[in-house]
Amino acid sequence: MSGENRVALTGRLAEVGVLRTTPGGIAVVQCRLRHESECKEAGKNRKVKAEVESIAFEGVARLIAAAALDSPLRVEGFLCAKSARSKKLVLHITNARFAEGD
């Protein structure tokens, strides 16, 4: 079974963990993104506020780990269960770009 699993989200860095290395030598950082927007739903505008648990690897992890809290950014990635035992969703960031002047 194959399907689409892509996420694009703008927000601000609400929390950034310590950059660490996996046993396999891969750089990884956990972070939390704060998102606020207004979306149309059922013909009406709805204010959306959410914090999204996220994780990034290698170059993207280094970029995020070096950023200041509350930095505005746009991320792309996919959703995955946190672990085999936890069905909680985590955003795996595969691309991040910091917005200037936002």
Image: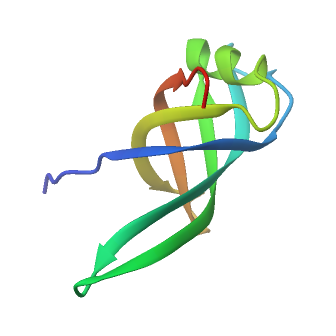
Q: How is the image coloured?
A: rainbow
Residue with the most extreme right position: 18
Residue 64 place in picture, x, y as percent: 68, 24
Res 88 visible: no
What's the residue at 30%, 73% (across, down)? 40
What's the residue at 13%, 57% (across, down)? 1
Res 61 visible: yes
Residue 79 place in picture, x, y as percent: 43, 53
The quarter of the rendered structure image containing the C terminus is top right
Residue 28 place in picture, x, y as percent: 69, 26
Image position of 19 (left or right of 93): right
Which residue occupies the foreground of this view, 95 or 81?
A: 95
Residue 86 place in picture, x, y as percent: 61, 68
Locate residue 41: give its quadrant.
Answer: bottom left
Seen in the picture, residue 77 relative to 1 is either above or below; the reply is above
Count of marks placed on residues? 0
Which residue occupies the foreground of this view, 7 or 71?
A: 71
What's the residue at 65%, 22% (across, down)? 61
Seen in the picture, residue 13 relative to 33 is either above or below; the reply is above
Image position of 80 (left or right of 33): left
Image position of 93 (left or right of 100): left
Locate residue 78: give its quadrant.
Answer: top left
Which residue occupies the foreground of this view, 49 or 17?
A: 49
Image position of 70 (left or right of 6): right
What's the residue at 51%, 70% (across, down)? 48
Which residue occupies the foreground of this view, 31 or 45?
A: 45
